[in-house]
Image (cartoon, grey):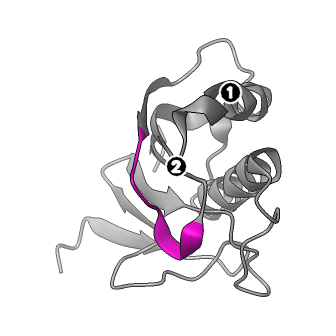
Amino acid sequence: MNPSLKAIETNFAPAPVGPYSQAVLVNGWLYCSGQIALNPSTGLIVGNGNVLEEADQVLKNLEAVLKAANATAANVVRTTIYLKNLKDFEKVNTIYSNFFKGKVSPARACVEVAALPKGALVEIDCIAYIEKA
């Protein structure tokens, strides 16, 4: 493994469901894997089909991964939102805007997808820059 690559892991976010890291830190850049609304303790999707509750849990999971790398939402420079139904865009945007309420909002893309792992309605990944990594 490249010595400049560091896997970031925390028990406060769901364990990966495949062969990937929760995040990888390299030269001050943190690449966070996509998070879905899994409860880290139970491994079950939260929200019972409520996209607002799912989006909230997704961002809590991302926050835990960022914290494990000594970062916050303010360090995030780019996100990608994956929605099962693009009609949920406004609802997810409400939760998202509360999470990223700094002076500079991250650049982002939002796409509708055919399916997400475990039947999730929303998934979000991000890239953050940590100046003193």
Q: Quadrant of the N terminus?
A: bottom left
Q: Residues within 10 Å of mark 1 (few under 14, many from 20)?
A: some
- Which element is circle 2 on? loop
Identify the residue shown where x is 30% and y is 50%.
Answer: 27
Q: Which residue is mark 1?
A: 93
- Locate residue 14: give its quadrant: bottom right
- Locate residue 4: give its quadrant: bottom left
Type of the residue with mark 2: Lys
Residue 95: x, y in percent?
Answer: 77, 34
Type of the residue with mark 1: Asn
Asked if residue 69 is among those painted magenta in the image, a careful observer would answer no
- Which element is circle 1 on? helix
Q: Which residues are magenta?
A: 112-119
In this orientation, which residue lies closer to the viewer: 127 or 111?
111
Q: Which numbered mark, 1 or 2, is in the foreground of this view? A: 2
In this orientation, which residue lies closer to the viewer: 71 or 110?
110
Q: Residues within 10 Å of mark 2 (few under 14, many from 20)?
A: some
Q: Which residue is mark 2?
A: 84
Relative to 57, 88 lies left or right:
left
Check the image and report above or below for 41 versus 32: below
Task: Tell me if residue 88 can be seen.
Answer: yes
